[in-house]
Structures are given as C-alpha cells and as structure tokens.
C-alpha cells in the first residue's frame, strides 16, 4: 500500500533527484523498513538538507507497492553516500569507539559491484515482458531488477546462499535460480553479468562453475573459464560441498533427474579423467568415501592415493554423534560389503574395527563378522558346522546408522534355529574369553575411556557399560550378556572402583561414574540409560550401537533385576527414574516412560523409604516455592518418600503408579511446605487422592496446589481473566507484603506482548501493555538494591533464565520496545552482576549480542545503549573434565556474518567488538578470531571490512587463507594491500554476445 503524501508541491531539489540518493532512501525504507521521519533525518544529516517526512520529493518514486518477501534483509548496506563523512552509528556513550570512514564501506566488493551494475541498462526481449514483470521488485523506472540482482550476488559471494536462520539447508536454491534464468530467457544477460571483473562476481563464478559442471552446462562453464582465467574447479572442494548437502539423511529423491549417487559418480569421472590426486588428508578421506558410496570399488582411490604422505591411520577420525554425516568419511571401515571390507583391512585401516565387529555380532551379520575375525586369526566355535552355509540363513532386514547410507551395515540377519527349534545367534558361537577379548579391544578404541585410563578399575566399568549398551541394542543377547557378567563377577572383576584422592567430582558426568557396589548386576542396572539420550556414552558407541529404544531398555532392566538386585538401592530408583518425568518442555524428545518405574515397583522397590532425588530441581516445585510463602528451601532439601517426590514432578504418571501400588497419601499433608498456612493441597484433589480417582488426578494435575493468600489469589485470578490493569494495581498495592507479585505481573505482560497476531497484538493494545510495564518499572520492581540476589539460588536461576528467554524472543521478533523494558528491569534486578557470579549466566550476554546481530539491528543497538559490554562473557569457564560451553564464540560479529547484515557488522566494530576474540563459524568450529572465521566461511565483504578497518589482521587472514575452501577468497586476501582502494578493472564486458 502506497503512503499518502502531502499535496503541497515542493521546489525541485537536485540532490533528491540524484539516483544514488534515491537508492539510499529506497533501501532505508524497503529493506531496513525505516519510518519516513527517520529517513528524512538521515538524508538531512548526510546531505545537509532540510526536507521533512511530508515532502513529496522525499517519497515520490521510491516508496511504492512492494512485497517484503521479495527482498531479503541479508544485505543492509544503507550508509551515507558522501565519502567525506565518517559513518557514526549510535553508541551508548555517544562516542564512536572505532571510526570507520564511509569510503571503506563504499569500496567493499558489493559496493564496487553495485556501482558497476548501475551502469548496465536492463534490456529484455518484448516477448519476455510478462515474465520479467515478475522480477520487478522496485518502483524505480530505470533499474527494475538491480536490487534483486545485487541481493543474489551478495548472498552467493558471501556464502549465504545455503544458510538460513533455522539451519534448514536449501541445497537447490542456486539450481532454482539458474532454472528460472533459463525459463525467462536470461542466459545472455547472465553471461554479461558473469563477465564483470569484480571480486564479488569472480567469487560467484567460482561457486557457479561447480553447478554448471553438474548440470552439464558447458557453454557457461567455458565462458567463466575464458573470462576469469584464475578461477578453477577444485573438484575435491566441490565433492566435499556436495557431500555435506546430505546432512543427517540420505534421501532417495532425485534432483534434476540425477540421483545423488550419479552426481558423485560424475565428479569421480572428472577426477579419473584429469588424474587429480588428493592433496590433503581431508581430500583423501572424501575420495575414499565417495568411491565406497557411488562405486563400492576403491581402485580409483588406490591409484591416486599417496600412502607415504597420507598413511591409513591419518585418514581415520573419531566418530561423532554431533556430525553423523561425516562419520562415513571418518571411518573407512564402515561398509556392508565383505570383500571391500577385507581389502580395506589388508590396506591397513583399523579404526574402529573392534566396535564394528561387536555390532556385526549383535546384528547376526555373519559375513562381516567372519571377515573381521579371520583378519585377526580368530574364528567362531562351530564344531557342528552350523555356520558353514550362510546362504541357508534367513534374509536380511535393514538396520541403519544415523547419517549413513542404508546399505552400510548390510542389515541384520534373522537367527537360524537348531534341531530343537531354538534360535541360535552368532554370540552363541563365541567363548566368553574370546568375547571378553573383543570387549577389551572395544574399550581401547573408545576415546572417552582414554580420558580416565589412570583411574583404578575404570576399564571394568567401561566393560560393563559396553555390555549393557550391547544388550539394549539387541535384547535377544541379554541372556548371553548376563552370562558374561556372571563370569566377570565370578572372577571378582568388578571390585570397588577407587578414584585418586585428588580426583575432581565437580562435574556431573564424571560424578555419575562413581559406584562402590560390588554387585555387578546392580552396577549394570545403573548403567541403563533412562532417557532417549546417549550423552552418557561415548560418541563412537552412540553412533554404532544406537539407536535402541525404551522398549529394549525396559526388557534389559527386567532381566537384570531378576538376578536378585535390590531395586531400592539402585541409583535408577534413587534418582534417574524420577528425573525423567521432570524434563523441560524444550526436551520433548526425552519424554518419560512409565515402564522403568513399573519394572522397579514390580520387583519390590520400597515405596515407603526415602529417595535421594533432589526435589528442588523439580519444575513444579520451583514454580510454587518462593519467599512469598515463607518457606525456607533448606527445610525441603534432602530425602523424601517417593510419593512426595512424585507430587512435585511435572508429570502425573509417577504418582498414578505409586497409588496403584498402595502408596500412603497422608504423607503429603505432613510436608512442611503445607504447614505454613501459605500453600495447601486443593481439597477436591486431596479427596481424589484418597479415593484413588486416577482420571481426576490426571485431569486436574496442574490445579493440585492452591495459594492461601488473598492478594496472591486476586492477582492470579485477574491475570487468568486477562484484566491486566487490575492485576497491576493489586501487585503495586501488595508490593511490600508480596514483593514478587509485581515481577510476575511484569513477566505476564511481557509474555502477552510477545504473542503472535491475535486480538492483543494491535497497536493500541500493545501500547497499553507497554504502558503497564512502564508503570511497574517506575514503581521499582526490586524495592531495594541487590534484592534479587537475596532470593534462593534456584528461584533466582529460574527467573534469570526466564528473563533471558523473553529477551531472545523479543530479539527474534524485532520488538525493541519490549527488549528495552526487559533490559531496564534487568538493571533494577542487577541481572548482569548475578550473571557474572553464575556459571549458567556465563555466555548469555554474548549470545544475546549474537542473536541481535542475527535478527535485529535495532535490538543490537538497544543492547549497546543499555551499557552491555559487547565483548563481555566471551569465554565460559572450562575445567579438566569439562567440554567448552555451547555458547562459546557466539558473538555479535559471528551473528552479523551469519546473517550477512553488513550494518550490524559495521555497528559492532564501531562499538568495540573485538575481531580478535574467539568466534564460531557456520560449522560450529571455534576459531581464535572473527577474522579467521570470515576467511574460512568465505564472507568476502566481511573480510574486506576487517582488513580495511585494521590492516594488522592481515597476517591472521593469510593464515586462514591456507585452509579455506573458497580459493578466490584466499586469493583476494593474498593480493590485498593497505589503502589499495577500488580494485575494479575497467575491462568490463556488458554485451553478452561479444562475451560469447
């Protein structure tokens, strides 16, 4: 919808008629979505004018009907056009920490390309008129396609074409663009565009030649080679990029009538014809994996492989459950072809052959298992010759591994039966001593085991863990696994696991390893993973012996409990089984499974004995416990009976099961939290507990606890019926008696304001909600300095995380007004000081900057204007047994580079963002600096900005250029010189016919 402008005619203004100024105003309005008042202020400042928002000269010709979906926000170079003016974006101190002259931004590669693009006259055949109208994204009459063209070139040249915020890869976006160009008859203009000699276009040509090759478009491929002779098709880089498109799955769909395998085969043919050997370990890995994948023949790899430079062990990498698509490349032995496997073993590949052997045995895969055993001079104990005729065995059924082709493991054989009709499995033909040898070698291959190698008897702990996981993978093996465990127990293998006196148990996953029980089966019970997560197991095991299911695990649990294990003494009963019913909403994949608890109850777990589970970690408990109710947290910290723990869990299933097993209900009323005249169990709910009305308990689970306070109840009733003003007035009135009421009302108002498009989201209602929030802030939520930090730690943690979640939601939705309120509230509550003392807070501030740079420039400015340090909390704490925090390196610079928002990048640099701080790249790999990330990820314009801003970073860029896969980006870094200015060549080919 076009804006209504003033009818009063203005005098002509040559400056406003300038095409560059019009383009500046158009981007400010259409791309950055500035208001006309802000545009007028910016134009007046940049060009020494005095226009107003109502001047028709300001609006005519640049503000028109346009779909916001047609223009991406990934390109935002909307800065002053006068090279004499230094670009001074807003900062909190009103002073620019790092001055960046506009001439720097003006001469970025995308700026050079834009100025040349402006000289091109867009001319298309009349027959294509209807088609090219679809491309028109601006009302400017002389250059209808330039913004879209510039956007496409910017995204491709900065490696943004395959990246979007939700990490869903759009692999065919370039193909779609090329198809669309062919449909519209734009091959000629495309050739002319690719003939322009600017850094942006050369990078685009380097990317597109890979696609032209796969598409068989030799005409455009030859044109690129002729026009830009320095570009080259690095087939290994192309193969690696193509390989990574198959993230997490191996889809069977075809693309442009070519399957994925045939595309890989085409690249292998090119390698074969050009006789191009791998030049690094990574390239050798990729070539081997591609040969296995597309050909099941590694003769090409063997012919081109330089074994002296890249010995077999150098091509093997640790399997990871974080990047499953790379495991097929890292582990050459992963194959379902016995003959190929035998050849790989003879070639010298070893990792992880013992774990793969274990999987083959558990899968009853005789050909693969025999190949591994014979390679080591071992064999099955088969005096009757039952395994001599594998062709008589049943057919294969496929069992796949995450991120690998479905034919990798050749499936799982169904067992054969003996003369008595009893199923026999491969493990039945293995002596326990031989199976123990296999398990021992598996432990040697585990990376996690190596970290605890010096801990006494830890090897046997890992053996038990591996055996339990094997049983969960194939429950048919549980009887055999139990015989192995009994054999271990008889040999006194599992004695007390003793840790050194100075061993650090501060970190949770290490602390869980401590187990002093000599009962091997009790130890095995505690090693069963209670959730659908593999975090307790090493990455190698997680990928090769997973996935298993809750059903499998429950079968294993029941079998282990049948060996006389006292369920009450197990850690599963004391802790694990309760925690699985208390998962956060964000962990829905870890849904609870009542079968674990039922299995423990069936074998006699004591429902009247206290359990050690920390009830303070319960979501429901945190919800009800705070100083309003006068309860000291320490009064409930410690052991409780199972029914008391179950009552405070997030889900009702544990309580329902306990009631079925006749747990006493009167224990609940005796809890101290219900003896303070503040909280009480709902009478109707209590009656339902007494009469064991399970349906009522399940239906009204969320209403089981009531508040016995007039003020609290009135506020909550007002919030439930949507009467915000009444709730606000009550919260202020009861402020001294109930200090948290105002905070809770404030949070509820913010939540309503952040809702989607509904009845509350119109402008009038939003303004009212913001006014209500302002009233609460004016009444000082904190009452006194440092009040928030005096709360119980668990409660303050919950509020802190809630405030951070709301802040992230406001940033994602670009609601800077709400973010301002949250930041002001955080100042009153001293959240910054609180975060600095809390591990959970470490890294949160820098992640806010990361998401602001990713989603909203306005919110990024707001964070800085509230005094938050753009470089604060870059490094979370680490320890000897602690993995780096997940938010490490999530900085404003990394967010700006991921989004392609050049304004956010410039703003961050001007406000002191340190380009030498640790920074993550798009593959979540940490680098020492943002400069290296820009080079490695191929962010051409970001590299140019860093180099021109601080020439001293050139040495870092040169170092990163040695490892980047973007060759022309590396060439750009090598040829860059300080103060070189524009490097555009005058040899520009605008005529497509002459280019041909």
Image: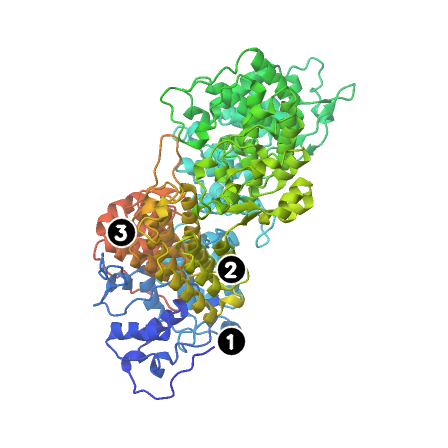
Residue 708 or residue 266, whichever sits in front: 708
In primary-sequence order, the first of circles 3 and 1 is 1
In primary-sequence order, the first of circles 1 and 2 is 1
Q: Of all residues shown, which one is farthest toward the bottom?
A: 8
Residue 331 or residue 990, whichever sits in front: 331
- In which quadrant of the rendered view does residue 949 lie? bottom left
Q: Which residue is mark 1?
A: 129
User: Few, some or many C-alpha atoms within 10 Å of disc 3 (few <14, some 14-19, many ≥20)?
Assistant: few
Element type where label 3 sits in the image: helix
Residue at 48%, 51% (x, y): give it.
167
Residue 224 or residue 100, whichever sits in front: 100
- In which quadrant of the rendered view does residue 991 lie? bottom left
User: Few, some or many C-alpha atoms within 10 Å of disc 1 (few <14, some 14-19, many ≥20)?
Assistant: few
Element type where label 1 sits in the image: helix
Residue 505: give x, y in percent of width and height. 40, 27
In the figure, 120 relative to 159: above or below? below
Q: CA distance from mark 3 to mark 2?
A: 64 Å
Question: Do the numbered discs 1 and 2 sit on residues whose CB atoms are within 8 Å?
Answer: no
Q: Which residue is mark 3?
A: 975
In the figure, 356 relative to 107: above or below? above
Residue 608: give x, y in percent of width and height. 60, 29
Q: Which residue is mark 2?
A: 719
Question: Do the numbered discs 3 and 1 sit on residues whose CB atoms are within 8 Å?
Answer: no
Mark toward the viewer: 1 or 2: 2
């Amino acid at each position: 919808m076009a804006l209504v402008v003033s009818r009063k005619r203005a005098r002509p203004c040559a400056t406003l008629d300038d095409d560059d100024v019009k383009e500046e105003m158009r981007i400010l309005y259409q791309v950055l979505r500035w208001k006309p008042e802000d545009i007028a202020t910016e134009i007046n400042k940049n060009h020494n004018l005095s226009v107003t928002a109502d001047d028709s000269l300001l609006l005519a010709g640049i503000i028109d009907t346009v779909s916001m979906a047609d223009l991406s926000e990934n390109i935002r170079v909307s800065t002053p056009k006068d090279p004499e003016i230094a670009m001074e974006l807003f900062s909190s101190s009103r002073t620019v920490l790092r001055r960046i002259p506009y001439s720097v931004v003006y001469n970025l590669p995308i700026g050079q390309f834009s100025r040349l693009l402006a000289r091109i006259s867009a001319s298309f055949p009349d027959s294509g008129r209807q088609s090219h109208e679809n491309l028109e994204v601006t009302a400017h009459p002389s250059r209808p396609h330039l913004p879209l063209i510039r956007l496409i070139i910017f995204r491709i040249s900065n490696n943004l074409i395959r990246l979007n915020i939700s990490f869903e890869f759009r692999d065919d976006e370039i193909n779609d663009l090329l198809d669309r160009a062919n449909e519209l008859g734009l091959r000629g203009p495309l050739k002319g565009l690719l003939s322009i000699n600017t850094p942006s276009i050369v990078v685009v040509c380097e990317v597109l030649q890979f696609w032209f090759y796969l598409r068989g478009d030799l005409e455009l491929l030859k044109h690129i080679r002729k026009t830009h002779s320095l570009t080259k098709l690095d087939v290994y880089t192309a193969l690696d990029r193509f390989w990574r498109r198959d993230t997490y799955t191996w889809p069977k769909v075809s693309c442009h009538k070519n399957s994925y395998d045939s595309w890989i085969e085409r690249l292998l043919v090119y390698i074969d014809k050009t006789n191009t050997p791998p030049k690094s370990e990574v390239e050798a890995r990729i070539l081997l994996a591609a040969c296995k994948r597309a050909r099941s023949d590694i003769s090409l790899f063997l012919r081109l492989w330089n074994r002296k430079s890249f010995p077999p062990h150098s091509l093997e990498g640790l399997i990871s459950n974080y990047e499953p698509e790379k495991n097929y490349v890292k582990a050459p032995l992963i194959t379902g072809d016995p003959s190929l496997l035998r050849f790989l073993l003879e070639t010298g590949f070893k990792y992880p052959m013992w774990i793969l052997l274990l999987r083959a045995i558990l899968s009853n895969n005789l050909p693969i298992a025999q190949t591994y055993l014979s390679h080591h001079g071992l064999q099955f104990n088969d005096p009757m010759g039952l395994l001599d005729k594998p062709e008589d065995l049943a057919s294969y059924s496929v069992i796949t591994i995450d991120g690998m082709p479905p034919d990798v493991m050749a499936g799982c054989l169904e067992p054969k039966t003996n003369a008595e009709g009893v199923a026999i499995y491969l493990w039945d033909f293995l002596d326990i001593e031989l199976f123990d040898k296999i398990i021992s070698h598996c432990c040697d291959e585990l990376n996690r085991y190596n970290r605890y190698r010096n801990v006494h008897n830890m090897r046997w702990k890992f053996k038990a863990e591996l055996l339990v996981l094997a049983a969960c993978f194939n429950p048919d093996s549980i009887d055999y696994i139990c015989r192995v465990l009994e054999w271990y127990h008889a040999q006194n293998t599992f004695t007390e696991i003793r840790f050194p006196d100075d061993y650090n148990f501060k970190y949770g996953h290490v602390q869980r390893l401590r187990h002093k029980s000599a009962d091997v089966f009790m130890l095995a019970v505690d090693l069963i993973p209670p959730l659908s997560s593999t975090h307790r197991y090493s990455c190698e095991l997680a990928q090769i012996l997973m996935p298993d299911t809750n059903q499998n695990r429950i079968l294993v649990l029941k079998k282990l409990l049948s060996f006389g294990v006292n369920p009450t003494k197990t850690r599963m009963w004391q802790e694990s089984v309760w925690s699985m019913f208390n998962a956060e909403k964000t962990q829905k994949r870890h849904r609870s499974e009542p079968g674990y608890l039922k299995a423990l109850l069936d074998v006699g777990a004591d429902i009247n004995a206290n359990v050690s589970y920390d009830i303070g970690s319960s979501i429901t408990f945190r919800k009800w416990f705070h100083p309003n109710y006068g309860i000291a947290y320490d009064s409930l910290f410690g052991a409780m009976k199972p029914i008391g723990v179950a009552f405070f869990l997030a889900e009702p299933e544990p309580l329902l099961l306990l009631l079925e097993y006749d747990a006493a209900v009167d224990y609940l009323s005796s809890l101290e939290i219900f003896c303070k005249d503040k909280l009480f169990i709902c009478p109707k709910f209590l009656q339902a507990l007494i009469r064991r009305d399970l349906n009522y308990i399940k239906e009204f689970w969320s209403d089981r606890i009531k508040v016995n306070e007039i003020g609290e109840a009135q506020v909550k009733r007002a919030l439930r019926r949507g009467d915000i003003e009444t709730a606000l007035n009550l919260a202020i009135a009861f402020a001294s008696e109930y200090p948290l009421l105002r905070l809770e009302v404030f949070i509820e108002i913010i939540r309503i304001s952040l809702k989607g498009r509904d009845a509350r989201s119109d402008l009038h209602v939003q303004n009212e909600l913001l006014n209500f929030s302002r009233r609460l802030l004016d009444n000082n939520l904190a009452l006194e300095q440092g009040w928030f930090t005096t709360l119980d730690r668990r409660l303050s943690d919950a509020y802190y995380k809630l405030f951070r979640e709301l802040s992230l939601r406001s940033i994602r939705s670009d609601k800077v007004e709400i973010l301002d309120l949250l930041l002001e509230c955080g100042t009153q509550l001293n959240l910054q000081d609180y975060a600095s003392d809390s591990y959970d807070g470490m890294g949160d501030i820098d992640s806010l900057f990361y998401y602001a740079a990713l989603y909203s420039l306005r919110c990024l400015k707001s964070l800085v204007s509230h005094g938050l340090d753009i470089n604060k909390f870059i490094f979370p704490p680490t320890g000897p047994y602690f993995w780096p925090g997940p938010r490490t390196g999530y900085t404003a610079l990394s967010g700006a580079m991921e989004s392609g928002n050049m304004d956010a990048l410039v703003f961050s640099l001007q406000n002191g963002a340190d380009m030498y701080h640790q920074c993550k790249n798009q593959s979540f790999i940490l680098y020492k600096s943002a400069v290296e990330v820009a080079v490695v990820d191929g962010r051409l314009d970001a590299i140019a900005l860093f180099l021109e801003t601080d020439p001293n970073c050139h040495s870092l860029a040169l170092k990163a250029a040695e490892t980047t896969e973007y060759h022309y980006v590396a060439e750009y870094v090598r040829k860059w010189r300080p103060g070189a200015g524009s490097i555009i060549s005058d040899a520009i080919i605008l005529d497509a016919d002459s280019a041909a």
